[in-house]
Image: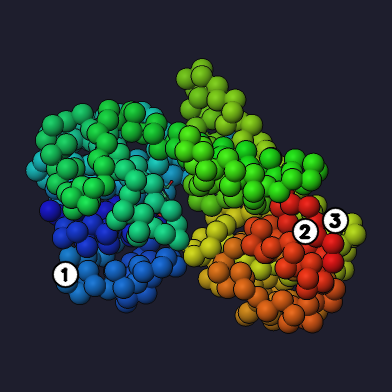
Amino acid sequence: MRVAMIGTGYVGLVTGACLADFGHVVTCVDKDPAKIESLLAGRMPIYEPGLEQLVARNVREKRLSFSTDLAPAVKDAAVVFLAVGTPSRRGDGHADLSYVYGAVREIAAAIEGFTVVVTKSTVPVGTGDEVERLIREIRPDADIAVVSNPEFLREGAAIEDFKRPDRIVVGVEDERARTVMAEVYRPLHLNQGPLLFTQRRTSEMIKYAANAFLATKITFINEIADLCEKAGADVQEVARGIGLDNRIGAKFLHAGPGYGGSCFPKDTLALLRTGQEYGAPLRVVEAVVGVNDARKSSMARKIIAALEGNVAGKTVALLGLTFKPNTDDMRESPSIPIVYALQDKGAHVRAYDPQGMEEARKVLVDVDYRDSAYDCLEGADVAVIVTEWDEFRALDLERVKELLKQPVIVDLRNIYRLDEMARHGFRYESIGRAAAAP
Ligand code: NAD
């Protein structure tokens, strides 16, 4: 089947490459010429494990191509996926749908023959109706069906998630389009990937409800962590203790510096706005957004407290900057407000991240970027573990101790054991666990 993927960002590139790997013939389109040029030269615009090989294989086997030219790709396609960004609209937190509607106008002009237009971008309930209305207004003659097919992949494990999803949600109200979508995902379905067909509006809602629920789980355990710290309990054991209950589940119960990334912050806000629009306020989600925002400054305060309340003129070494490991994505990373807060109090901030420094340089200036964890730690007053990259999980603690000006570690990801840190003589502050005495 011929597929056009409009938008070759994180989701578009991974989806396009995986669909090509299933045997479909996919053209990934992007309006950013630099991105397409780099893909044509075999360079990935993002860091995602396994992506480069997957793309190379499917380009070589002529199932995957890249272009800045939308019209020919759409003209030939039976299915056109929309995978453009839907960031927060400046000022009010609504999803900014200008990229979606911009792409839809271009698609409408190029459609030939029966075409299924699939919204993979995360869009508020009712957007599919507007996409359909717009296409019919521009091209009353076009034979189309508009489908919602939200994406649930996680950055850092995107290919695995796409190829072995918990479910594929397809919001479709047209029989022909339903058959086409079943064909698109047939290889996954054969692999037991459950296809859930719903009404289009329901499918749009599922995506936001899923993200808001996961953000709630994270925020819940973060607040429990704060209580554990004060009450002398261990949040990791609490998480294990509740997570073993099947009704709760163990995932998304890792206490940390608060959620970030390209999805949860903007999607929770957009869902709140939708709730307000429909007169159905979502108070739980509202609390989650507020608590998560406040958490960033409380993390900065935690670091400052580890330096006896004063960071002015001190050097803070951050290990990790991306919002999670195995990605170079810096969008809404908790590291950003933490760095600002520390700099605001006069700290010199140093940082090392295995993949994220190029992206970080675009948003965090006045940071002294270093090439390795140990280089970053040399002479620093405190080490702060911000992102749980594997390479920070087994640091040579004796060397760390020698390099630091004083043996103080603040671990915002709980990747070390309290007794281990005490044994090495560190002052070790983590999340939701009583500080270990050196
Ligand atoms: P992104 O910003 O990485 O990529 C979007 C791409 O679309 C950009 O390269 C941009 O140049 C391109 N684009 C915009 N308008 C275009 C047009 N008219 N024609 C061609 N290309 C155009 O975004 P992303 O992270 O891939 O997210 C895309 C959507 O998927 C969003 O709605 C997001 O919420 C959703 N989503 C993202 C993730 C994730 O982990 N990143 C996961 C699930 C869902």
- Up-down relation of residue 405 to residue 170 (above or below): below
Marked residue nearer the N-terminal end (3 or 1) = 1
Disc 3 packing (10 Å; few <14; some 14–19; many ≥20)? few
Q: Which residue is mark 2?
A: 429
- Tell me how far mark 3 sits from mark 1, CA to CA: 57 Å
Q: Position of residue 4 (x, y in %)?
A: 22, 53
- The three-letter amino acid code for the residue at tag 3 is Ala
Q: Quadrant of the C terminus?
A: bottom right
Q: Can you tell me whether the CB of the residue at mark 3 lies under 8 Å from the nearest atom of ligand 1?
A: no
Label 3 close to label 2 by CB (< 8 Å): yes
x and y, in percent, of residue 19 in the image: 23, 57
Mark 2 within 8 Å of ligand 1, using the beta carbon: no
Q: Which residue is mark 1?
A: 62
Residue type, mark 2 in image: Glu
Disc 1 vs disc 2: Cβ atoms closer than 8 Å?
A: no
Amino acid identity at mark 1: Lys
Residue at the (29%, 43%) spot, across then down: 168
Q: Label 3 vs label 2: CA separation?
A: 10 Å
Left or right: where does residue 187 sit relative to residue 29? Answer: left
Q: Residue furthest left?
A: 113
- Mark found first going from the N terminus, 1 or 2: 1
Closer to viewer: mark 3 or mark 1? 3
Q: Return the residue nearer the eye: 164 or 358.
A: 164
| Image position, residue 83 (x, y; %) | 34, 49
Residue 435 found in image quarter:
bottom right
Sequence-wise, the earlier of marks 3 and 2 is 3
Q: What is the CA distance from the residue labelled 1 to the residue labelled 2?
A: 53 Å
Q: Is residue 429 left or right of residue 89?
A: right
Q: Secondary structure at mark 3?
A: helix
- Residue at image location 14% in from the left, 54% down from the top: 2
Q: Which mark is residue 305?
A: 3
